[in-house]
Image: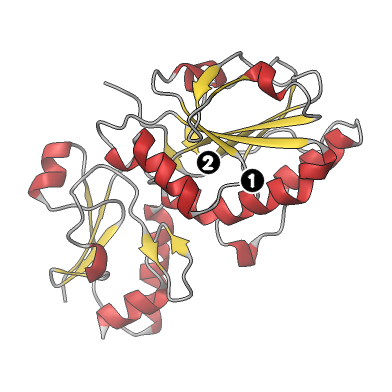
């Protein structure tokens, strides 16, 4: 069960690939906070990765912060280890924080099921949009820009026209 | 011609891969059934040398030889397209080449 619309963001303190701990309060100056359930190994994450970087770039000046979080079990998927996360972030020049949820607590709190899966929290940190970044993993075939549309709406202090879409991607790799 | 599509149900890509494969088969006039095989456990993945979902083999040969020897696992497979993009399914060109 995902965190519900208008429900507040769950608190967290997680290590980032930059070597620092990051908590929900650290982003209190952001007008909009986008939490992205993510990982390294998933081809769907990789297919959307450039678009996520572009969204952070395009919306940074308007006060949007994107934070990617990997909760995957690195024992079953070594490509998702913290060290591999650091490598991926460096190689792809991530312009957003990339946090490691080793205990999977934030994934459980959000009710995440897929990677990538986005959660948009407004200035009061209430959920305004949940689901997919857009409607096609093939960026040349996108017709609906769900995340961008949601950000535009929230920044205009309006409710997004679409508040929930199915996230398409790999399953979160839970610890056994 | 023996065509196998191995998949893991935890990855959503195999229906799209199967649809593309069937389309290419029709376009090329290949009269062959696609044998679907679900991989359910790590042990099966090891036994079948399953590098991720979906994996398509034509007469035993992987349609993407570059990824065929990756560590067997219940995971989504990454395919690298000719233009540098990443895809969860093989490209039409990879399938066409494999069926040639």
Foreground residue among B54 and A98? A98
Viewed as shown, does residue B28 lie left or right of A25? left
Residue A41 bears which disc, if any?
none
Location of residue A124 with respect to B23 vertically, above or below: above
Percent coordinates x, y for residue B75 in the rendering: 30, 44
How dense is the environment of label 1, judged by Cα within 10 Å: few (below 14), some, or many (20 and up)? Answer: many
Residue A116 bears which disc, if any?
2
Residue carrying label 1: A133
Q: Are marks 1 and 2 in contact (CB under 8 Å)?
A: yes
Viewed as shown, does residue B84 lie left or right of B66? right
Location of residue A98 with respect to A109 vertically, above or below: below
Foreground residue among B66 and B23? B66
| Image quarter (top left, top right, bottom left or bottom right) of the C terminus of chain B | bottom left
Percent coordinates x, y for residue B88 in the rendering: 41, 57
Residue appearing at x 61%, y 13% in the figure = A11
Percent coordinates x, y for residue A67 in the rendering: 61, 34
Q: Is residue B96 visible?
A: yes
């Amino acid at each position: 069960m995902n965190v519900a619309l208008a429900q507040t963001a769950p608190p967290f303190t997680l290590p980032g690939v930059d070597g620092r701990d990051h908590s929900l309060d650290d982003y209190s100056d952001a007008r909009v906070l986008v939490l992205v359930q993510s990982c390294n190994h998933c081809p769907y994450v990789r297919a959307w990765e450039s678009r996520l970087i572009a969204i952070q770039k395009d919306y940074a000046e308007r006060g949007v912060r994107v934070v990617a979080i990997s909760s995957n079990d690195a024992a079953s998927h070594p490509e998702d280890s913290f060290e591999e996360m650091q490598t991926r972030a460096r190689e792809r020049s991530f312009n957003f924080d990339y946090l490691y949820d080793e205990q999977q607590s934030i994934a459980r709190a959000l009710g995440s099921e897929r990677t990538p899966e986005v959660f948009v929290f407004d200035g009061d940190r209430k959920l305004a949009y949940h689901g997919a970044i857009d409607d096609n993993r093939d960026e040349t075939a996108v017709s609906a820009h769900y995340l961008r549309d949601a950000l535009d709406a929230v920044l205009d202090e309006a409710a997004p026209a679409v508040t929930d879409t199915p996230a398409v991607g790999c399953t979160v790799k839970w610890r056994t | 011609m023996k065509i196998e599509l191995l998949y893991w149900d935890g990855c959503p890509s195999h229906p799209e891969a199967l649809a593309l494969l069937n389309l290419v088969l029709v376009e090329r006039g290949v009269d062959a059934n696609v044998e679907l095989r679900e991989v359910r456990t790590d042990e099966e993945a090891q036994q079948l040398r399953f590098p991720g979902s979906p994996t398509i083999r034509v007469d035993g040969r992987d349609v993407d030889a570059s990824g065929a020897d990756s560590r067997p696992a219940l995971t989504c497979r990454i395919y690298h397209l000719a233009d540098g993009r990443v895809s969860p399914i093989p490209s039409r060109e990879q399938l066409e080449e494999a069926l040639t």
